[in-house]
Image (cartoon, rainbow, N blue to C red):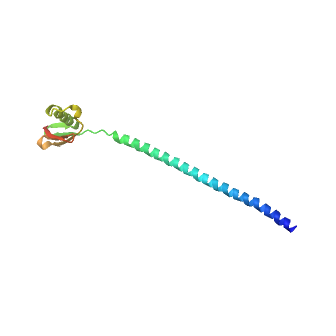
Amino acid sequence: MAEAKKTAKATVKKPVAKAAETTAKKAAAETTAKKTTAKATETKTTAAKKTTTKTAAAKTNKKAAAVKENISIQFAGKEYTTEQLVKIAKDVWEFDLKKDPADFKEVQLYVKPEEAKAYYVINGTETGSFNI
């Protein structure tokens, strides 16, 4: 009879051990699934924050770009705006230098009121001056 009890106990221990092992595997799988879900949620949250940040930055840049500039130079009873000086430079390009107006891409102007002159660099190569 003692042998029957030992066999019964051994038989009972094996299924319990297997059940405990299966439970441990399920718990590990659930933990892994929770970690994966947490990482996915974190990734989505991070992506949403980045999108929100980019959108806010874009709105800020649009507001900054809306600044209106108006610059006038006054001297010796004369007044010139930047638009007027650029127009004069375009006219010099077209009529004095005999260049195509479509080729006028960039201009840098340096105004010297004491000389009543504006110096220009057009398209990074053509240099000269005109009286103002």
Q: Is residue 66 left or right of residue 75?
A: right
> Among all residues in the image, which is located at the extreme bottom?
2
Q: Quadrant of the C terminus?
A: top left
> Among all residues in the image, which is located at the extreme right?
1
13 lies above or below 127:
below
* Residue 19 position in % (x across, y down): 73, 57
44 lies above or below 1:
above
Residue at the image point whose x is 49% and y is 46% from the top: 47
- Depth check, front residue: 8 or 118: 8
* Residue 75 position in % (x across, y down): 15, 40
Residue at the image point whose x is 22% and y is 34% from the top: 103
115 lies above or below 25:
above
* Residue 117 position in % (x across, y down): 13, 40
Residue at the image point whose x is 52% and y is 47% from the top: 44
Q: Is residue 123 left or right of residue 59?
A: left
- Depth check, front residue: 126 or 114: 126
Q: Quadrant of the N terminus?
A: bottom right
Hey, which quadrant is residue 10 in on the image?
bottom right
* Residue 106 position in % (x across, y down): 23, 39
Hey, which quadrant is residue 26 in on the image?
bottom right
Hey, which quadrant is residue 79 in on the image?
top left
